[in-house]
Image (cartoon, rainbow, N blue to C red):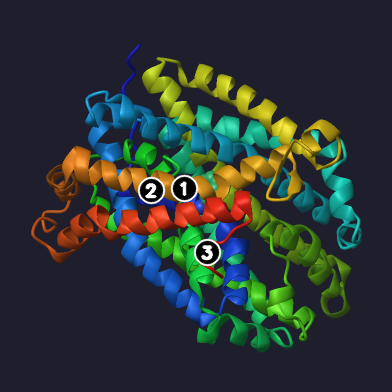
Amino acid sequence: MTVERELFSSRLGFILAAAGSAVGIGNLVGFPVNAAKNGGGAFLLVYALFVILVCLPVMMAEMAIGRKTVKNPVGAYNALSNNSKLWSVAGIFGMLTPFMIAVFYMVITVWIMGYMVMAATGNLDHLASGAAFGEFINSYYVFGAMAIVVAIVGVILLSGVKEGIEKAAKTLMPALFVMLVLLVAFVLTRDNAFAGLRFFLIPDIDKLNPSVINSALSQAFFSLSLGMGILITYGSYIDRRTDIVGSAKLVAITDTGVAFTAGLMMLPAVFSFNPEVNPQELSDSSVSLIFTFLPKIFLALQTSIGYVGASAVAVVFFTLVFFAAITSLVSIIEVPVAYLVDEKCHSRKKALTTLLMTAGILTLFATVSFGMVPFFTEFVHYAGAPKSFFDIIYDVFYDTILPLNGFLLCLFVSYRWRKANLSAELAVGNDKYQGSWIEKYVNLSLSTFIPVILLAIFLNTVAQKFFAYNLLGL
Ligand code: PHE
């Protein structure tokens, strides 16, 4: 069955959809926490350099591969390598990674939805009590919330690229920007907000060490949705007039801008709640920050703006994160959908049903691995501790595998597809590209130091996560 492939309706539609994928929980929570813990302005600088020097060329290459082949990652690697067995492995990684990320991202999105609803129904005081999170994730409500999230994502994806993905991004992204700006404006008028700003912005060079640099790059890669096959797939939906180089820059600017703005909201909020806080003590995981720490901050607002006002702020915050999570979830599930449609000739509907069922079952296993079902809660054992089903998916697919996928992509475009072909594709829609210094930089970096950096980060992350050993010596 060959159905005409849908395209995004405009460059703006594509940019918003790609930015919708990129802007997620990683920007709103992961980035501010990382920045505060790892040297404030110094971290921001390293992060910005990585975005420009390492991530942008990779992003352009992913989009170019997608548009050139008009295919999903598996089909794209096969098409450009004449069905080489070796390279098909990279394609399979590019498809399996998003599938598995979808599983744990879905779990977190379900919790966010639960919190949004509970804050809106007057339960902020309960959320702020220490026990609420553990209770909620082990209650049967999660299954109801999961059914709703699956339905929302299903409806968006079933409506297709233009009417589904693009329309959702065009509605949710502007709403997200407005909510973010409102929250920043509100937070900055609180007492002590300035202490948080100082922590976020003033560089503390002493904190910079190889581990921080590693985490800046991992954060940037995850945040820009690289190494997940998403930008290959979205690239396959753009027309040949669209300038990939300019679009990639705008996506990176939007993503980094939102992450930076989220820092202007989170850290002043944390400090106005407790001026003595030491960011080093902020929880390691962004997840527990959202679900256990923030509700306390929101509740504390009741002394100045009343319980209803405090609940309203909490609702705006959780809605903001929920919107960001939905557009990311949509993008990640679209990758295996495109695979089944392109390679297995499924209709969109059949592909979606297959996927939501298979990913849905794994998500259920992950959902019950927080204590509900002991088998999944203590699923495996590594790095000296028992790990749940959720943990292992998170550890393998959250950030470990992304630099590996990026590394394979760099080798692929430089040495198999070849730089001249990449240049030719990037020049479509941008007549000034060929001969420009950007072209020279992209070709040089992708074939030399970017893959070396990505491989080093991959090996170090594996050593750290699975063997509790830091190769960087710190
Ligand atoms: N860029 C997203 C974020 O920061 C990462 C992501 C994309 C996660 C797509 C899941 C799906 O949260």
Percent x, y of residue 31 = 56, 66
Percent x, y of residue 410 = 30, 48
Q: Which residue is mark 1?
A: 402
Specify whether tag 2 is near ligand 1 (CB below 8 Å). Answer: no
- What residue do we see at 53% from left, 68% from top? 473
Labelled pair 1, 2 in contact (Cβ < 8 Å): yes
Specify whether tag 3 is near ligand 1 (CB below 8 Å). Answer: no
Q: Which residue is mark 3?
A: 215
Badge 3 amino acid? Ser
Badge 1 amino acid? Leu
- What residue do we see at 37% from left, 51% from top? 15
Q: Is residue 472 above or below residue 1?
A: below
Badge 2 amino acid? Gly
114 displayed left or right of 344? right
Alpha carbons under labels 3 and 1: distance apart: 13 Å
5 displayed left or right of 403? left
Mark found first going from the N terminus, 3 or 2:
3
- Element under disc 2: helix
Instruction: Tell me how many marks there are.
Output: 3
Which of the image's four quarters has the C terminus?
Answer: bottom right
Q: Residue furthest top?
A: 1
Q: Which residue is mark 2?
A: 406
Percent x, y of residue 255 = 46, 61
Alpha carbons under labels 1 and 2: distance apart: 6 Å
- Element under disc 1: helix
- Element under disc 3: helix
Which of the image's four quarters has the N terminus?
Answer: top left
Labelled pair 3, 2 in contact (Cβ < 8 Å): no
Q: Is residue 459 above or below residue 270?
A: above
Q: Is residue 194 above or below residue 343?
A: below
Mark found first going from the N terminus, 3 or 1:
3
Residue 344 in sight in this render: yes
